[in-house]
Image (cartoon, helix red, strand yellow):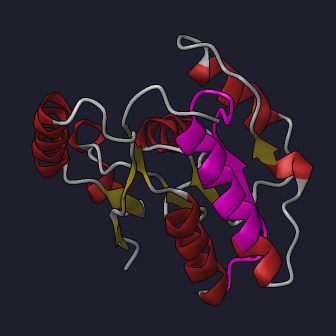
Amino acid sequence: VDLAGDLFLLEGERTVDAITDCLIRRGYRRIGFIGDIQYARTNALRWLGFQEGMARNGLAAEPGLCLTKAIGRDDYRAEIAAFLDGIPKIPEAFVCASDFVAFVALNLLGERGLRVPENVMLSGYDDTKEFLLEHHRVITAHVQNGLLGKQIIRQLLYRIENPVSDFEEIQIFPKILYRDN
């Protein structure tokens, strides 16, 4: 696909692969995934990372434990609730495509009497402070938004000075925050 401009991507494939691998090394075997993989390329890459982490450890992503379909902006709570209600036995962990998704799942699991991380482990992505997931020991990927903004501005200035330069795809690698201890 030809780029129509510079593209910044928050790397998700290797990051979520590493999170999934860590969960498996800690003894979790039944792991689900929650996230609209059609929403953004980064979500699709996070899903791919989840599958790769499972496969490398000899495990398959169980379709019944994974919610990957398109979800409307205002439908997350209802869709995730219906998904959780359809699972006969909640898995040991869920890898979520974002902290927002993890926050919704956290609340819905709590309504079902399940505690994180005592009954089910959760991971998100973004380290979004508004969800207070650090208080619930949810694993996440920390994105330094302030530095990301500065890098985007630098690239914009470069593009202004060099308008005929080839477009670039720039990946940002977040730091994983393991908060489950």
Q: 155 and 165: which one is in front? A: 165
Q: Quadrant of residue 81?
A: top right
User: Is residue 34 visible in this depiction of the protein?
Assistant: yes
**What residue appears at the point 65 percent right and 62 percent down from the top-left corner?**
49
Check if residue 94 falls in the magenta segment: no
**What residue appears at the point 60 percent right and 64 percent down from the top-left corner?**
119
Placement of 100 over or under 23, stated as above or below: above
- Residue 151, image x, y percentages: 16, 47
Placement of 62 over or under 104, stated as above or below: below
Placement of 60 over or under 34, stated as above or below: below
Location of the N terminus by quadrant is top right
Q: How many marks?
A: 0
Furthest residue to the front? 164
User: Is residue 118 visible in this depiction of the protein?
Assistant: no
Q: Quadrant of residue 181?
A: bottom left
- Residue 111, image x, y percentages: 56, 36
**What residue appears at the point 74 percent right and 37 percent down from the top-left corner?**
68
Q: Quadrant of residue 176?
A: bottom left
- Residue 76, image x, y percentages: 59, 22
Q: Is 35 left or right of 139, judged from the image as shown?
A: right
Region in magenta: 27-52
Placement of 153 over or under 93, stated as above or below: above
Q: Is 123 left or right of 49, judged from the image as shown?
A: left
Q: 50 and 100: which one is in front? A: 50
**What residue appears at the point 54 percent right and 75 percent down from the top-left corner?**
18
- Residue 157, image x, y percentages: 10, 35
Q: Is 97 left or right of 62, judged from the image as shown?
A: left
Check if residue 40 falls in the magenta segment: yes
